[in-house]
Image (cartoon, helix red, strand yellow):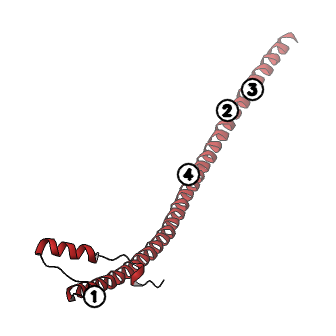
């Protein structure tokens, strides 16, 4: 984008400058006065300095935007790693809890089976005693009748 001095607005209007100098200092400047030539040169120098400053600022802003994009990308990667690590830790904790609950339930089942077996043994012993007592009573009754 190549721009010329005519495309850019002037910083000072020469007619307004001549009028202001006449009003404040009582000096009339002509259109070919060296002071106006110096003002024009000064305007050109200032405009060039502003153009360079604008280019420099544009480059700096572009570089800053690139840096911000790189930082965002890096932060997103780091956040993704942190989230995956945290999710893996949570999964491991859940798996540990499941394994512990499984062991607890297996232990409880073994204890219930042992208690049930003990109750069954006691039932069979009681049934055997009752059956023995019935046979004994039958034997005694049969022995008296015969």
Q: Position of residue 60 (x, y in %)?
A: 38, 79
Q: Give me the disc on residue 77.
A: none
Q: Position of residue 1 (x, y in %)?
A: 48, 83
Residue wearing tag 4: 97
Q: Residue at x 78, y 20 (%)?
A: 136
Q: Quadrant of residue 118?
A: top right
Question: Of helix, strand and loop, which one carries label 1?
Answer: helix
Would you say 82 lies left or right of 61 here? right
**Quarter of the image that includes the C terminus:** top right
Can you tell which of label 3 and label 2 is closer to the viewer?
2
Q: Which residue is mark 3?
A: 127
- Residue 7 horizontal side relative to residue 37, left or right: right
- Helix, strand or loop at label 2? It is helix
User: How far across and down, in percent of the image, does residue 69 sit?
Assistant: 47, 72
Q: Residues within 10 Å of mark 2 (few under 14, many from 20)?
A: few
Q: Earlier in the sequence, mark 3 or mark 4?
A: 4
On residue 119, the disc is: 2
């Amino acid at each position: 984008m190549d721009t010329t001095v005519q495309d850019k607005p002037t910083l000072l209007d020469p007619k307004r400058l001549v009028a202001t100098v006449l009003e404040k200092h009582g000096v009339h400047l002509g259109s070919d006065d060296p002071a106006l030539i110096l003002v024009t040169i000064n305007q050109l120098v200032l405009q060039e300095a502003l153009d360079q400053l604008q280019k420099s600022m544009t480059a700096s802003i572009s570089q800053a935007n690139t840096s911000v994009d790189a930082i965002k990308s890096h932060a997103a990667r780091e956040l993704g790693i942190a989230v995956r690590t945290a999710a893996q830790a949570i999964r491991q904790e859940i798996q540990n809890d499941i394994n512990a609950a499984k062991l607890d339930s297996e232990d409880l089942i073994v204890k219930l089976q042992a208690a049930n077996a003990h109750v069954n043994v006691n039932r069979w012993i009681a049934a055997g005693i009752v059956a023995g007592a019935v046979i004994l009573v039958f034997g005694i009754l049969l022995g008296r009748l015969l």
